[in-house]
Amino acid sequence: MNILIYRYGSICEPDIITGFQELGNHVDEITAEIYNKNLLPSEGVVLLKNKLLSKSYDFVFSVNFFPFISEVCNIFQIRYLCWTVDSPVMELYSNSVTNQWNRIFLFDQAQYDEFASRNPEYIFHLPLASNPARWNRVISDASLHNIERFSSEISFVGSLYTEKSPYDRLKNAPSYLSGYLNGIMAAQLKIYGYNFLEELLTDDMVQTFRKHLPGFYTPPENFRRDDRIAMARIYLEPKVSAMERVLVMKLLGSHYPVNLYTGSDTTGLPVKNCGLVKTLTEMPLVFHYSKINLNITSKSIHADLPLRIFDVLGCGGFLLTNYQTELTNYFTPGTDLDVYTSEDDLLTKTEYYLTHEKDRMEIAHNGYETTKKYHNYPERLLQMISLAYGITEGAI
């Protein structure tokens, strides 16, 4: 197949391209948005149109959903395959989601449950994946200096979301509203596996919040508007994620040495801020040489697993993660990784795995083998192409 990939710089793109190529496909790329983050959709339309006029492609692909790509592909009557890796993806509220040439793959089961009815034949659920072969090469080539540099007792790679919390722009809100929101966010912080913030927001609360938050999200033309969803997904859930990550850093950092690889401000936290790591060349070493890798799933991912889980396991690292409802569909807790369901549980399991190396190493090995066998990119992309073309498993 000839595949045209529209790129914007997602860390998943290189592995997806390699995965398509390993399946025997030819891949061309449009890369302008990687170098120009202010590229307008109208400019993207011209780039895409010119490519489609210059060569015959079987389908166009992107990470996440781009309404303008959908519209162009609908005109050219060529399949548009996309795969979400983020949540929320507000572009999914575009009317373009209903186009018949779309083949939309959503990584989060909750995301799929929300949007499937808008284009029932052409929206699918597809979990994320990893590239163990790539990570193996990086780990095998690591110098003794880098092995020592990236070894740690406990590590977390990622943002604390403290700089990604637009909720903090809320100004002069009535005390009843601030108190209520603080209460439900504190409650959500204690609950794993069920997100209830959106359903606890009344119309009056949403309108008042919108009034007191400068720059409240306004959807583009031809997008479905739902201020309750926007309030929960864009403002409350990132705030709870920030609260949770700071809480976990304080909790573990006060008992154990924790290395945090982040660009976030860690002033006052009992952790070692190691700064940012390079995704393709340094992050695998952190994952492989940390005794315990933490995953703290963003609250905007309601059911499924973030990329970090697959990549830690794909690097042969041991993972301790919060509970997500879809986790047991892919991995077995206590066999491939382990799961915490409360602050006390997190502390107990951290202590156990820091002092039981044999169990920790065995679980890390199992997680690696499971990821290598079932959750690699060629396997996942073959599922994607089969679904996009209506091919049954026996006909592949």
Image (cartoon, rainbow, N blue to C red):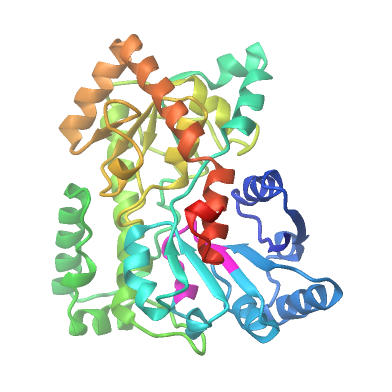
Looking at the image, the residue that sits furthest to the right is 54
Residue 266, by quadrant, is: top left
Position of the N terminus, as image quadrant, is bottom right
Horizontal relation, residue 206 to residue 375: left or right: left
In the rendered view, tell whether residue 38 sits above or below residue 131: below
Q: Position of residue 142 (x, y in %)?
A: 66, 19
Q: Position of residue 327 (x, y in %)?
A: 31, 43
The number of callouts visible is: 0
Q: Position of residue 222 (x, y in %)?
A: 50, 89
Horizontal relation, residue 309 to residue 102: left or right: left
Looking at the image, the residue that sits furthest to the front is 394
Residue sitting at 64 percent across and 14 percent down?
145
Q: Is residue 326 magenta?
A: no
Horizontal relation, residue 382 to residue 255: left or right: right
Q: Is residue 85 magenta?
A: yes
In the rendered view, tell whether residue 117 sits above or below residue 322: below
Q: Position of residue 280 (x, y in %)?
A: 64, 37
Residue 377, by quadrant, is: top right
Magenta extent: 81-92
- Of residue 163 and residue 40, the one placed in the foreground of this image is 40
- Of residue 161 and residue 317, the one placed in the foreground of this image is 317
